[in-house]
Amino acid sequence: EVQLLESGGELVQPGGSLRLSCAVSGFTLSSSVMGWVRQAPGKGLEWVSSIRARDNSAFYADSVKGRFTISTDNSKNTLYLQMNGLRAEDTAVYYCAKGGHDYNPFEYWGRGTLVTVSS
Amino acid sequence: EIVMTQSPATLSVSPGERATLSCRASQSVNSRLAWYQQKSGQSPRLLIYGASTRATGIPARFSGSGSGTEFTLTISSLQSEDFAVYYCQQYNSWPLTFGGGTKVEIK
C-alpha cells in the first residue's frame, strides 16, 4: 500500500526557513517522480515543485524559484522541501504527492502539513 | 504558462442526476489532463488521467473526455459521496497548472 506522510509544518516568521519532510512507503522512491502541491486556506491547488529521484531533475513554480529546494534521500525513503525566505503568501497546507514529472499525474497524495508564515 | 479555466465555479445538482464539469486550457495539453476530487478536510484524490482513463478504484459513473484544449468530467448519477470540489490539472508542460475548481453541491 502506498503511503505518504508529511511533517515539519509549523508557525514561522516572515523571512524564516523551514524544511518539510515526506516519508514514503509502498514503492521505491529512487525510481519515482514526486512533487509538492500547496493549498492556501480556502483556495485552490497550486503546484510548487517536482523531482525525478534517480537524477534529481527538478522544476519549480516561479513563485518559489530561488527560495525553495526539493530533494530526496533515497536511503531514507524521504522527500524534502527546504523553504527559505518565507513570506505570508506561502501560508498553506503542503501536500506531498507521487507523480508530477515525466508526464505523470499526481497519483497518490499525503494528508498534508500546515505551514503558517506570520509575525 | 498554460492557464486552466474551469466552469461553472459551482454546480448545484440533485442526487441521482448527471453532472457535467468543463475545463479549458489556454493552449493544447494533448491528452495530459487529470481530474481530482477533494472532499472537505481531505487530500485530493486522482479520478481521471490521460483525459479519459479512470484511476484505480474509481467508479464507472465518473468519465472524462476531450483532448487539446477542451475537456469534460461527467458524473453520470451523483451519489451523496460525490459532493466535493473537482480540479483539473495539465501535466503536459512546465509549470504544472491546476484549474480553479468546480464545487458540486447538493441542490
Image (cartoon, coloured by chain):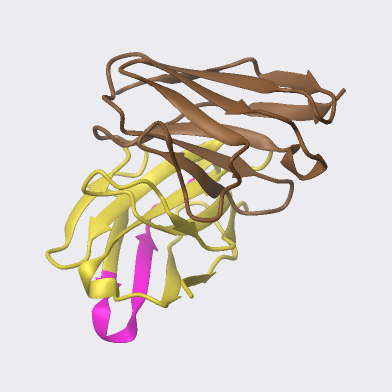
Q: Is residue A59 visible?
A: yes
Work out which residue is located at the far right of the displayed protein and give it: B107
Please tell me in which quadrant of the rendered image residue B42 appears: bottom right
Q: Is residue A13 above or below residue A42?
A: below
| Figure quadrant of residue B94 | top left
Left or right of A93? Residue B12 is: right
| Image side of residue B104 versus residue A92, left or right | right
Q: Is residue A78 magenta?
A: yes
Above or below: residue B5 compared with residue B36: above
Quarter of the image for residue A112 reads bottom right
The answer to which of B5 and B15 lies nearer the viewer is B15
Question: In the figure, B41 relative to A65: above or below?
Answer: below
Q: Colour of chain A?
A: yellow
Viewer-side residue, A64 vs B51: B51
> Which residue appears farthest toward the bottom when viewing the image?
A75
Whether residue A96 is situated above or below residue B31 in the rendered picture:
below
Residue A16 screen position, x and y as percent: 46, 59
Q: Residue at x 26, y 86 (%)?
A: A75
Q: Nearer the viewer, residue B31 or A90?
A: B31
In the rendered image, residue A20, in percent from the top left (x then y), is placed at: 45, 67
Residue A114: image x %, image y %? 60, 59
The residue most toward the front is B60
Colour for chain B in the figure: brown
| Camera-nearest residue between A105 and B95 | A105
Left or right of residue A50, residue A26 in this image: right
Bounds of the magenta span?
Answer: A72-87
Q: Residue at x 60, y 42 (%)?
A: B37
Residue A86 appears in the rendering: no
Find residue A109 and report its horizontal and vertical position in percent: 50, 58
A74 in magenta: yes
